[in-house]
Amino acid sequence: MPEIWLEKYRPVKFEDVVGNAGAVSILRSHAAAGTFPHLLLSGPPGCGKTTVVHCLAREHLGSFYEQGCIELNASDDRGIDVVREKIKGFAQQKVSLPEGKLKVIILDEADSMTQAAQQAMRRTMEIFSQTTRFALACNISSKIIEPIQSRCAILRFGRISDEDMIQRLKFVLEKEGAPYDQSGLEALVFSAEGDMRNALNGAQSTFNAFGEINRSTVFRMNDQPQPEKIRSCLDASLKKDMKGTFAPMHEIWQQGYSATDIISTFSRVAKQMDAPEHVKLEWLKEIGLTHARVTAGAQNLLQLDAMVAKILLVSQKG
């Protein structure tokens, strides 16, 4: 069975990590100094939070990495039992490590833990601080209780930049011998929205399904509205062309895409358009208001027509 690219090309050294250079640099300095504080890493999915912690654990533990490091996903079991059984159990476990080395517990999606579980973990962090370090990865740091935050060095991660994603995708595709072109890379990056995991999974799925990676195959695989149609709609609005503004959106609607998918693509394309900033802000305001109405249950063409009409009015005013 073919290996999943995401696992096959997961970075194991800091040099292989792409994006978030500031946070990675801080962790590399800890590795060089031989220190390992409790860590709280926050940021969106797929930006490399758990990957860089594993890199630090490997540097810290060396050949003892397998026995001295454990990763748990808090979303599998959010309650206090996971602290009592798995986390405390590993912290209590006797592991023969070289002097100065500490066991590492990596807890992914820590913000999904209940308050009671977090309080119990806070106490565990205190008791076993001489032998164990905790690295918590989360999407929203404000969901982590203050006593845990105060015990951790907090690192904030952002979405992977388009340039970094394209560089990594090129490396993987060339290693795998997968035919691709620049438009295919750009389509993968557009669909992933800064999520490296999403981009790699999309690349492998597209290659397995179609044997090549280009703009057409990527959007067929992801089943998303093609951004060129949305871009032509917004371009026409800037030229005050009413027919050209409405026609591409109607074409997308007739292809069976949901209002939510269309609005999401409108939002992403609008941010990238070459238009005055105040016009783009007004576009995004109208797109956001339409999204709110659609989310409330008004999933129909009338809402999209109203949104496009308001976008056209904004463009005409300049």
Image: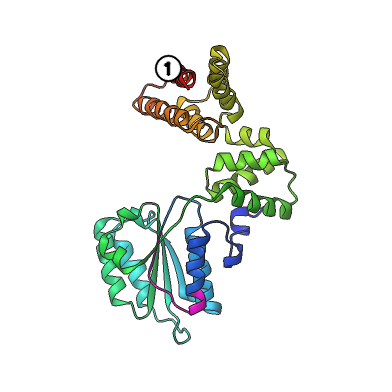
**Residue at 61% in and 41% down:** 188
Q: Secondary structure at mark 1?
A: helix
Measured as percent of width and height from the top left, residue 181 is found at 72, 41
Measured as percent of width and height from the top left, residue 8 is found at 63, 58
Front one among 157 and 100? 157
Measured as percent of width and height from the top left, residue 50 is found at 48, 61
Q: What is the three-letter code of the residue carrying label 1?
A: Ala
Q: How many marks?
A: 1
Residue span colored magenta = 31-41
Q: Is residue 33 magenta?
A: yes
Q: Is residue 127 left or right of residue 139?
A: left
Q: Is residue 140 left or right of residue 316?
A: left
**Can see residue 220?**
yes
- Compared to residue 172, the image places residue 147 above or below, namely below
**Residue at 43% in and 15% down:** 302
Measured as percent of width and height from the top left, residue 77 is found at 35, 56
Front one among 138 and 220? 138
Indicate the colouring scheme.
rainbow
Residue placed under numbered mark 1 in the picture: 306
